[in-house]
Amino acid sequence: MKWLTGSVIFTILFCLSIEAQTDVCTISSVAVHLKTRKQNIEKLRPNELAKIDISGVTEGSQISRSLRIPGTSLYTYVEVFFDDDLKFYDNLHDAITVWILVLRNRQRTDGNTISKVRTQIAFDEHFKQSSVTTAVKYGGKRVAVEVMCRGKKVVDE
């Protein structure tokens, strides 16, 4: 239960700390020692690792980044892919697919992968914001990586 609480705190920290930029996916991380007290975790600011501009993407666009996670020996590999393969009510829709891998080293192999998560999000005129997070315990630390994507499209009401 303590680990779940820590993960929720990490997610809240990410959401509060990322500037309200649009048409961008922001990759962030947090790494803390397992013995860090809850009140000290709440004071942490995530490390912004990279930004991916999604303003000019077209179907089939694929953008990836391989980055070192500060404060650890770990790496993250993030892939953002745009396609029209989201099936919803028998129709295909434009979508963003986001993969996050946490790796022991820079090589992307199953043996080096500690955690991986994938999500697919509709990318249409209603898209405003979505995030995906993965968290692991490794080397005496809690490590979380998040990709937050924001669009500037306005919902017509």
Image (cartoon, rainbow, N blue to C red):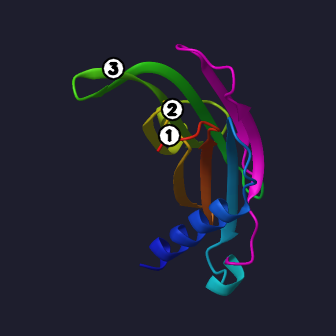
On screen, 11 above or below 120?
below
At horizontal 52% and vertical 35% (from top left) the residue drawn is: 98
The quadrant where residue 9 appears: bottom right
For the N terminus, the image quarter is bottom left
**C-alpha distance separating marks 2 and 3:** 15 Å
Q: Secondary structure at mark 3?
A: strand
Q: State yes or no: residue 46 in magenta.
A: yes
Three-letter amino acid code at the position of disc 1:
Asp
Q: Which one is closest to the eye, mark 3 or mark 1?
A: 1
Q: How many marks?
A: 3
Tell me which label, 2 or 3, sits earlier in the chain.
3
Dot 1 corresponds to which residue? Answer: 156
Q: Secondary structure at mark 2?
A: loop
Residue range highlighted in magenta: 42-69
Dot 2 corresponds to which residue? Answer: 125
Label 2 close to label 3 by CB (< 8 Å)? no
Q: Residues within 10 Å of mark 2 (few under 14, many from 20)?
A: few
